[in-house]
Image: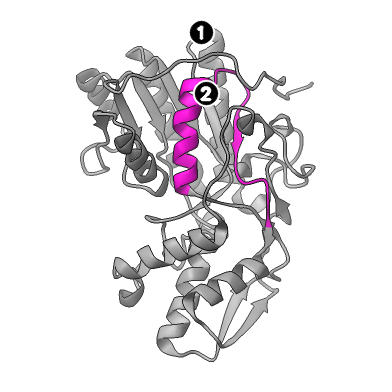
Amino acid sequence: MNTTIAAAPAVTSHRPLRRSDRIFVAGRRGLVGSAVWRHLSAEGFTELLGPDSSEMDLRNRTAVRDWFSLHRPRVVILAAARVGGIKANATWPTDFISDNLRIQVNVMDAALQHGVERLLFLGSSCIYPREASQPIREEALLTGPLEETNEAYALAKIAGIMQVRAVRRQHGLPWICAMPTNLYGPGDNFHPERSHVLPSLIRRFHEACVQQAPKVVNWGTGTPRRELLHVDDLARACLLLLERYDADLPVNVGTGEDLTIREIAEMVASVTGYEGRVEWDPSQPDGTPRKVLDISRITALGWKPEISLSDGIRDTYTWYTSMGVGSAGRG
């Protein structure tokens, strides 16, 4: 049976958002949500809603339903998720699939019940098969086995894409999905066990500088290639997609360029000022060998990334040290 999603045109409608629209940014305190909030605020949106987890647990179906009933947003940006790197995904796969499925189903069901007109679901490039042809086109979804180290998370995100697709087909609502590549930037998670590759490298090299360690040992071989996108570039893409895109197929958001993890580590070492030895531990997993996205669909809409990787790493490291995260050694 063919389970791929048929290709869709890059532009199908224009639906400008009113600056007075009530917009719910789910996951407002996270890396993506906080960047989206900053961008929407800068663009003049005045009715932004972003309760944190202490105000509403998105895994609690009753709490989510009651919140929607009270606040009735017109637009939802679903950026909330349990996320983490290779170690976190391998250690807690049950948490990753259970929490993310509940968050997605609860928010989308409540949004549907209360007539939310526009919803943007943010997934991840890990939804694509491990051996997908590079650069990865959106049509590669469901065409092969996933990367085992983050399979649980990827399956949850695929379920979210399918729920959006089902709502479009059954209810005719213009809900959409975006699949960002590996993200980084201010507000990232630097926890030693739950962070992604770039914040993990930043933390490791910074602590080596502080401790004057003679060497830094990184996971894997350093040969896998990764594409990295600054979260502020993604935030711009989110608004553009909400206003200009309306189709079944998810939209990739990335830079279209990648580097080896070894090259990325060298950039981080340079930014942090670390001058010791850099070694690699091949007994640890590498993850997907290569993952770079085809971004032709979103660039056809007029978007392109604006923040270079070198500037972005410097910006992220400045935030990391200014927040006292690095000096305190916290995640």
Q: Which residues are magenta?
A: 231-258
In this rendered view, identify the residue nearer to me: 149 or 280: 280
Q: Which residue is mark 2?
A: 176
Question: Around disc 1, counting alpha carbons within 10 Å, would you say few (fewer than 14), some (14 to 19), or many (20 or more)?
Answer: few
Position above or below: 272 against 166:
below
Asked if the stretch drawn in magenta spans residue 246, the answer is: yes
Q: Amino acid at mark 2?
A: Ile
Q: Residue at x 53, y 37 (%)?
A: 123
Residue 46 at least partly seen:
yes
Question: Around disc 2, counting alpha carbons within 10 Å, would you say few (fewer than 14), some (14 to 19), or many (20 or more)?
Answer: many
Q: Position of residue 114 (x, y in %)?
A: 32, 14
| Residue 50 location, quadrant | top left
Residue 110 at least partly seen:
no
| Secondary structure under the numbered disc 2 in the rendered image | strand
In this rendered view, identify the residue nearer to me: 197 or 39: 39
Q: Amino acid at mark 1?
A: Gly
Position above or below: 290 against 247:
below
Q: Residue at x 31, y 33 (%)?
A: 60
Which colouring convention does the figure follow?
one colour
Q: Residue at x 24, y 29 (%)?
A: 46
Q: Position of residue 153 (x, y in %)?
A: 55, 44
Say which mark, if any, is on residue 172.
1
Q: Position of residue 183 (x, y in %)?
A: 52, 50
| Secondary structure under the numbered disc 1 in the rendered image | loop
Q: CA distance from mark 2 to mark 1?
A: 12 Å
